[in-house]
Amino acid sequence: MSGEYRAIDYYKGIMKGNCRKELVDKINRLKKEKNAVILAHNYQLPEVQDIADYVGDSLGLSIQASKTNADIIVFCGVYFMAETAKILSPEKMVLIPDRKAGCPMADMITADELRELKVQHPKAKVLCYVNTTAEVKAECDVCCTSGNAERIVQEAFRTDDEIIFVPDQYLAHYISTRAGRDFILWKGYCPTHVKMLPEDIALQRTLHKDAEVIVHPECPAGITSIADKVLSTEGMCNYIKASEAREFIIGTEIGIIHRLQKENPGKLFYPLSERATCPNMKRTTLEKILWSLEELGFEVTVPPDIMNKARTCLQRMIDYKA
Ligand code: 13P
Ligand code: SF4
């Protein structure tokens, strides 16, 4: 079978012979022709991770986006991540293969709702999780990820008595216990991480007695309080690589297990719960990546005034990481 197929053929189900290889070859060819780079989040489908130039967490991917010499970034993740890449690399074309790949947590607070909260707490400084829209970031002082939230609170908000932390109530609760600081909360949450229950930890511990339980701070307090370690996705990858332990129960979106297994072939990984999948992260497929490269869609854009304000908020976080 020749390389004459276009993405639309795959959509129509015209798949014969060794079409997976053909699809991968075609993506790689187009990527070179158009000087594009493919970035994929740790939760993406295995075949999407495998074709990516870089796999990582939301912060790592954005920094990667700002450093690349490519003209086009195909961002395989959810919308706020692609938007963050665009804000940090405004001169590049950022594409998201599926426009509907949103993050329900990011959509749990709007800029109007945040403005209202700020009116109620006029003296408060505002910290936002990176899982927010550009409009919300534009209303905030500093941004954070789950990997740097504790440090940002301790350093950037050292002298502030009142801190609004949006939108994830569970990340805010966890950081509050670590940093010994109180926050004005927003009742947002990740629908995927709240599926994990304390009973799941109890069951997995009986099945895998030697395994360490590692969970993400988006999990509710009933989970983070009994896990062995609470880490961001990149934190999990780094910790496991360096660990002497051989078995791990992973309490986050199950897509990360593909990367963990690939990077640590001698170690064993068990999902804390197989229910922990993010449907939005699974919307991106090889067929959609090919379409994205062929048609240069869907292009991510952010209005300039929002972009500039949101960049200030993001840049403060990046500067604290240094
Ligand atoms: P990371 O910041 O660790 O990439 O996580 C983002 C996310 O959406 C977790 O659910
Ligand atoms: Fe959003 Fe949760 Fe999916 Fe992460 S796992 S993208 S927080 S819905």
Image (spheres, grey):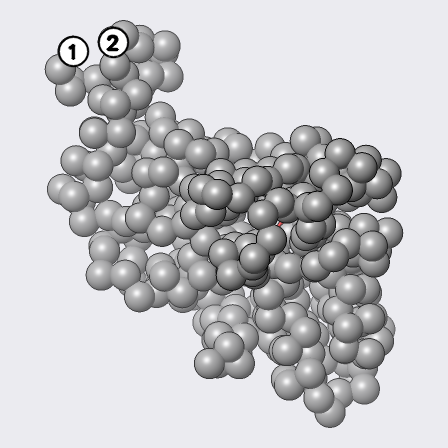
Identity of the residue drawn at 34% across and 34% down: 289
Q: Tell me whether the residue at label 2 lies in contact with that at label 1, contact meaning CB atoms closer than 8 angstroms.
A: yes
The residue singled out by tag 2 in the image is 17
Residue 191 lies, in percent from the top left, at 72, 41
Q: Amino acid at mark 2?
A: Gly
Badge 1: few (under 14), some or many (20 or more) residues near its Cα, within 10 Å?
A: few
Depth check: give the residue in front, 86 or 76.
76
User: Residue at the spot x=24%, y=48% of the render?
Assistant: 36
**Nearest to the observer: residue 316 or residue 42:** 42
Can you see residue 112? Answer: no
Asked if residue 5 is positioned above or below residue 225 in the image, the reply reads: above
Mark 1 CB within 8 Å of ligand 2: no
Write down the quadrant of residue 136 in the picture. Answer: bottom right
- Mark 1 lies on residue: 1
Q: Which residue is more in the foreground, 266 or 163?
A: 266
As helix, strand or loop, the secondary structure at mark 2 comes to loop
* Left or right: 9 in relation to 232: left
Q: Mark 2 and mark 1: span between their CA atoms?
A: 7 Å
Q: Residues within 10 Å of mark 2 (few under 14, many from 20)?
A: few
| Residue 315 in picture, x, y percent from top left | 48, 75
Above or below, comparing residue 131 to residue 177 in the picture: above
The disc at residue 203 is none
